[in-house]
Amino acid sequence: MLPRSATTITALALGVVMAAAGSVGAADRDHPVVIELFQSQVWTPQVVVNGRIDTVGTRRGEIEQVIAKADRGLGGPAVSAAGGRVTLNGAARTSPAEVWLVRYDPGIIQVPIRRGENGGKTLPHRNVVRELVKLGDWSGARRDYVLPRAGPANLKSAILVQQGRGGGAIAAARL
C-alpha cells in the first residue's frame, strides 16, 4: 500500500531518458543521485524515489514498496509560489540544501532506446525533464527565490529541494 503522500506523486523521467529524448546537459544531473546510491552507472528502466532508494522500473509491486520506504515524510520545508517567486520556509539546517526548478513535458513522447534490454525499441515516456535550473542553496528559515523567465508553454514546472549535491529529496512541489 502506498503512503498517504503518494497521492501527490509526479514521476519525472530524468537522466538516461532525458539524454535519449534530446535534452541538453540533463543526463549529468542524474549521476549525483547514482553516486549517492553507491552505483557505478545509470540504467533503464530505473526508478529512484526521493533520491534514496532505487528499483527496476517495470515492477509495479517493487515500486510501491520503494515509495513507502523512501517516503520523506512531512519534515521538509514548506514550499510556496506566487508572483514569480518561490518561498521556502522551515527549520535551520546544519548543511545547505539545493533548490532546483524542474521543467518537464507532461505529454507522452516516443523515445528510441539505443542500448540495454530495450535497445532498438521505441517506448513512450511521460513527464520528461527538459530543463533543470539551480535556484540556489537553502540553509533554513524563510528564503525567496526569483523564478527565471518561463520556458515553452507546453512545459510544467516543479521545485525540488535536496540534501546537498545528489542527496535525497527533502521537499518537492508542483507549480
Image (cartoon, rainbow, N blue to C red):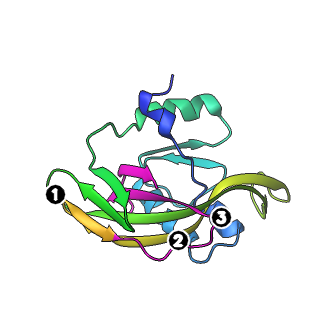
2 or 3: tag closer to the N-terminus: 2
Around disc 2, counting alpha carbons within 10 Å, would you say few (fewer than 14), some (14 to 19), or many (20 or more)? some
Q: In the depicted view, which residue is nearer to us: 147 or 161?
A: 147
Residue 93 image point, x, y percent: 16, 56
Residue 94 image point, x, y percent: 14, 58
Q: Which residue is mark 1?
A: 141
Looking at the image, do the residues carrying marks 2 and 3 touch, with CB atoms under 8 Å apart? no
Q: Is residue 165 visible?
A: no
Around disc 1, counting alpha carbons within 10 Å, would you say few (fewer than 14), some (14 to 19), or many (20 or more)? few
Residue 164 image point, x, y percent: 30, 62
Badge 3 amino acid: Asn
Looking at the image, do the residues carrying marks 1 and 2 touch, with CB atoms under 8 Å apart? no
Marks 2/3: CA–CA distance: 24 Å
Magenta segment: 146-175
Residue 135 image point, x, y percent: 36, 71
Q: Which residue is mark 2?
A: 28
3 or 1: tag closer to the N-terminus: 1
Marks 1/2: CA–CA distance: 30 Å
Badge 1 amino acid: Ala
Kindly identify the residue that appears in the image at 37 percent across and 58 percent down: 81
Looking at the image, do the residues carrying marks 3 and 1 touch, with CB atoms under 8 Å apart? no
Badge 2 amino acid: Asp
Question: Does 119 sit left or right of 172 as displayed?
Answer: right
Q: Which residue is mark 3?
A: 154
Q: Secondary structure at mark 2?
A: helix
Q: Secondary structure at mark 1?
A: loop
Residue 160 within the segment the image draws in magenta: yes
